[in-house]
Amino acid sequence: KNQVEQSPQSLIILEGKNCTLQCNYTVSPFSNLRWYKQDTGRGPVSLTIMTFSENTKSNGRYTATLDADTKQSSLHITASQLSDSASYICVVSEADSWGKLQFGAGTQVVVTP
Amino acid sequence: GAGVSQSPSNKVTEKGKDVELRCDPISGHTALYWYRQSLGQGLEFLIYFQGNSAPDKSGLPSDRFSAERTGGSVSTLTIQRTQQEDSAVYLCASSITGGRDSNQPQHFGDGTRLSIL
């Protein structure tokens, strides 16, 4: 069973609107949680990395939150742009794991004009 | 370039052949990772290198898969006697340092798309 679950699987939003993606995980012990953006045919690009003690982290129009008690994270995209169309992947690192990452299946975001 | 470089970008081969995939990490990055992304599925970890040694090989799916890293830089992933289920995108990533509980960002290449006929 995948230890990182993302929702929704996909969504379509209008350019300029906001959206929020969800990530639930069961990975334990927990080290850190990352959000990646993956354009079609390209490798993932890191957006944010949060450790246990961090509740929120921003990278431009992307804001990630983390609740380590409930093992939930969200990624909020503000004022979406066409270039935000991509797959957004939640990734959780196990503690003591040499940086080995557990990947969610991703949320496919399509921004339309 | 300054990023992680992978070659070839695409590889089509017949079932039963051996293939070699190459990864050039970012200069100075000591940690190197291989992942596999099958169609419609998330990425899965294959192997991690710290320098030239591999502390974690736990993700290699079978003994047909092997990897090496030389000079603390270039890495090759070899798949022997390829099977159709090996078809996937193979991604390489590097980070400045690795080690347990590493919080360093991993920088990914664009992958090698492997198709087994």
Image (tube, rainbow, N blue to C red):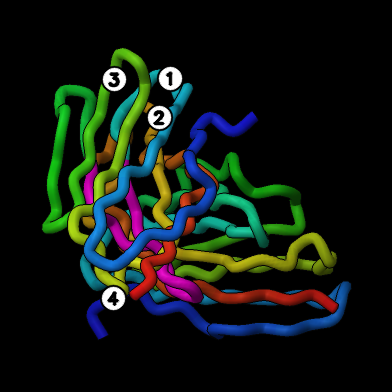
User: Are tags 2 and 3 found on a single chain?
Assistant: yes
Q: Residues within 10 Å of mark 3 (few under 14, many from 20)?
A: some
- Residue B3 is tagged as 4
- Residue A28 is tagged as 1
Give the residue displayed 59% in from the left and 40% down from the top: B58
Q: Is residue A83 left or right of residue A51?
A: right
Do labels 4 and 2 touch, CB within 8 Å? no
Give the magenta-colored segment's residue range: A34-49
Query: Where does the image place residue B80, in percent across and percent down from the top left?
Result: 77, 67
Check disc 2 and report the residue beneath it: A94
Mark before the other along the chain sequence, 1 or 3:
1
> Label 1's element?
loop
State the residue in front, B60 or B73.
Answer: B60
> Label 3's element?
loop
What amino acid does circle 2 point to?
Answer: Glu
Task: Quadrant for the N terminus of chain A, please.
Answer: top right
Mark before the other along the chain sequence, 1 or 2:
1
Q: Residues within 10 Å of mark 2 (few under 14, many from 20)?
A: many
- Residue A91 is tagged as none
- Residue A68 is tagged as 3
Chain that bears disc 2:
A
Q: Disc 1 versus disc 3: distance between alpha carbons?
A: 11 Å
Do labels 1 and 3 touch, CB within 8 Å? no
Q: Disc 2 versus disc 3: distance between alpha carbons?
A: 13 Å
